[in-house]
Image (tube, rainbow, N blue to C red):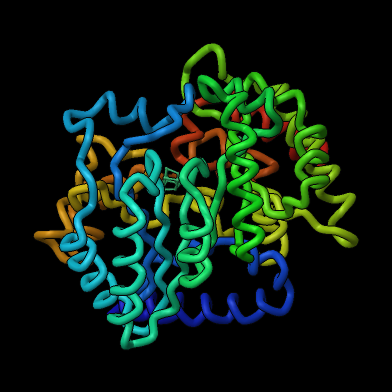
Amino acid sequence: MLLYFYLNTAKLLYFLLLFFDRLIFYHIDKSLPLCYNLGMANNLSIMIKPASAKCNAGCKYCFYRDEVQARSVKDYGTFSNELACTLIDKVLDYVGSGYLSIVFQGGEPTLAGYAFFEHFFSYLKIKNVANAKVMLSLQTNGLLIDKKWARLFKEHNVLVGVSLDGDRKATSERVVKGEELFPRILESIRILREEKVDFNILSVIHKGNVKRGKQIYEDFKKRGFSNLQFIPYLGDNPDYVLDAKDYAEFLIDTYSLYARDFNTSPTRIRQFDNYLMLIKRGYAEQCGMNGRCEPTLVFEGDGTAFPCDFYCTDEYVLGNVKHQSIEELLLSEPAIKFRSTSGLKEKCKECPYLNICKGGCKRYATSDSFCEAYKIFFSHTFK
Ligand code: SF4
Ligand code: SF4
C-alpha cells in the first residue's frame, strides 16, 4: 500500500515537473536525452550494446574495453533480429503508454549493421500500439555514417551523439591515426547536418586536452556545434588521468563561456544544464547527478542485462532478457544490491555544496580527485 502510494505520488510529481520544465527549461530539455527511470512503473531507460565492445576506432582511453578485459565474457556477440524483437516486446509491454528511452552504445553500435537498425526501428514502430513516448539516441565515433545512415536516423528521430574531443590534435591523442580520422568525423557531422539529424558532440576530457577548454568550446561554437557533453576520463592510464586542479580550471573556463552565451547564442553543455536544473527544480535528468543510481538496464549483445554502463561486470549480471521479464531484471538480487550501494559518503553530509553535487555518480566517487575538482569549481562559480 505504502509502495503504491509512493509510486503514484512520485509519478504525479514527475509529470508536474515535466510540465513546468517544458515552460521554464524548454530549450534545455529539448536538447537532452531524458532519463526517465524514476523507479516508476511504465517509464524505462535502457542502453543496448548491439555489437558488444567491438569498435572500429579503438580509442586508447576506452573505459568499456578496460571493463570488458576484467570480466569472464569479453565479447557477448552481436544482437540478432530475433533478440531485438524479444527485447522490444518486453520493454513495450513494461512501459505501456509511458516513456521509453533507448540509447545505443558500444563499443561502436553501428557495427551491428544498417540492416539491424532498420529492422529494430521498424519493428519498434509497428509494435508500439500503446503509443509509448519513445526517445531514441545513439552514440557513435562517426566513422560509418553516410547519407543512408543519416536518413534512417532522421526517419526515426534518433538523436546522434558523435565522439569528438576537440581538434585534429585531440583526435590524434585519442586514436591511433587520429589525424586521418578527424576529417572523416567532420564529414559525418556534415552529413548529419545536411540530413537535418539532431546530433550532439561528446568529448572525453583528459590530461591531453584539459588545458584547452576555452579553445575547444570556441572551436565547437565556430563550427556551429551547440549541444555538447564533456565527460571526464575515469581510468587509471597515466597518459590520460586528470589532475583535479586542471579539471576544475576546465570547468570554470567552459562554464564562464556557457554563461556568457546563455541568453544570446546558447551552447548546451549537459553537465551545466543539469546544475541549472538542480538549482531551479532540485532534480537533474543525468544519472548520478541526483545522488543516486537510477534503475537503468544495459543489454549486451546476447541479451545479458546489467544495471549500469560502468558496471557491466560479472558481479552485476542481472539475467538475460531472453529468459526474464523487465520487472524480474529490475528487481533481481544484483540490481537491488547495486542500487543499495549507492548513497552519500560521510564527508558529503556536511559539505556546503551537497545541494548541487549530491555526492556525484557512484563510479566517479571512487576517485577523490573529482570531489576536489568540484569543490574548487562550485566555490568559484556558485558562490
Ligand atoms: S554508477 Fe553513476 S552512471 Fe551508473 S547508475 Fe550509478 S550514478 Fe548512474
Ligand atoms: S563536493 Fe565532494 S564532499 Fe561535496 S557533495 Fe560533492 S563529492 Fe561530496
Tell me: residue 62, above or below residue 156: above
Residue 314 shows in the view: yes
Name the side, left or right, on which 169 lies relative to 370. Answer: right
Number of numbered markers: 0
User: Which residue sits at x=62%, y=24%?
Assistant: 179
Name the side, left or right, on which 301 lies relative to 108. Answer: left
User: Which residue sits at x=71%, y=31%?
Assistant: 167
Tell me: residue 163, above or below residue 128: above
Relative to the observer, which residue lies in front, 59 or 56?
56
Relative to the observer, which residue lies in front, 247 or 158?
158
Residue 350 shows in the view: no
Name the side, left or right, on which 83 lies relative to 130. Answer: left
Name the side, left or right, on which 95 lies relative to 351. Answer: left
User: Which residue sits at x=56%, y=33%?
Assistant: 347
Q: Position of residue 27 (x, y in %)?
A: 72, 68
Q: Position of residue 339 (x, y in %)?
A: 34, 49
Location of the N terminus by quadrant is bottom left
